[in-house]
Image: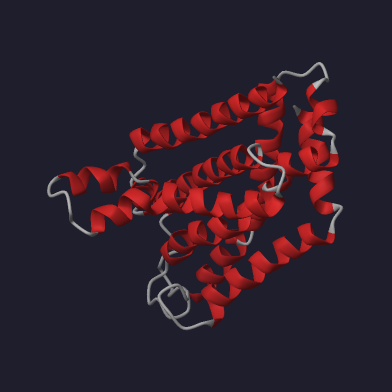
Amino acid sequence: MWQIFGKDIKQFFGSFNGILTLMAFAVVAGLFFWYLEGPYNLLFSGFADLTPVFRLLPWLLIFVLPAVSMRSFSEEYRAGTAELLLTKPVSTSRIIAGKIAAVFFIGLLMILPLGIYLLGLKALMMPGERIDRGIILAALTGLLLLIAIFSATGVWVSSLTRNQTGAYLGGVFVLFLLYYGFYGLASFQWVGSADYFLRRLSLAGVYERLTGGLMDWNAVAYLLFWVLLFGWLGVLSVNKRQK
């Protein structure tokens, strides 16, 4: 598993596109949080909290993480190294886990500036004000689990095709539906009282509860279920190609 992880990390940072992806994410996030006027600007929010950051980051990651995961298997298929990889004395589940871990690690690097945002927010606070650590912990837990889900989903989509562009576009599409599909459907209020349950089932709704400061362990378990589900789908997809 860790050999796969190390190989994918080296491959990502060994290309200019990998560095460019990280830089682009940092620049776009910085513009939204510190420069552009709007609901996500920390300087104009009027409150000493990082809720705008946690609310926007999933949307940025939906478009950026598939650019990281699209190479996971698509590049292996295109280069003809997938067969060599799958003949090694490593189970398919460990290969999938290693690739998901690599994408997840890069996702962690993308959100590292959260520490800088915290320091900046602290500098802007009035004397006597404090950052609610409970809210930050719950929101950070939700964000990390979302990154894990997005990573597992992206690796699964990449395992379905040898076309990297298709893997990227497919990853963005699936992540959008997965994150906002039920939530958006509920907003139309087409199904009466079921709208409430659709909203709670959606990843956006679950994540919203966590970013609201509620450490809901049922929500955490629900998000972990999606990580395991897409990891399992990835194993099935790769095993099917072996036959």
- Name the image quarter holding residue 1: top right
Residue 118 in sight in this render = yes
Location of residue 25 in the rendering, given as x and y in whole percent from the top left corner? 64, 65
Q: Which residue reaches farthest front?
A: 243
Q: Residue at the location (12% across, 49% down)?
A: 192
Q: Residue at x 27, y 48 (%)?
A: 199
Is there any visible trace of residue 213 in the rendered image?
no
**Image x and y of residue 179, in percent:** 42, 50
107 up-or-down from 2: above or below: below
Question: Horizontally, is 100 left or right of 222 in the view?
Answer: right
23 or 46: which is nearer to us?
23
Q: Total number of numbered labels?
A: 0
Camera-side residue of 8 and 172: 172
Looking at the image, residue 87 sits to the left or right of residue 103; the answer is right
- Rendered-image quadrant of the C terminus: top right
Left/right of residue 87 with respect to residue 57 in the rendered view: right
**Above or below: residue 189 compared with residue 214:** below
Q: Is residue 25 above or below residue 91?
A: below
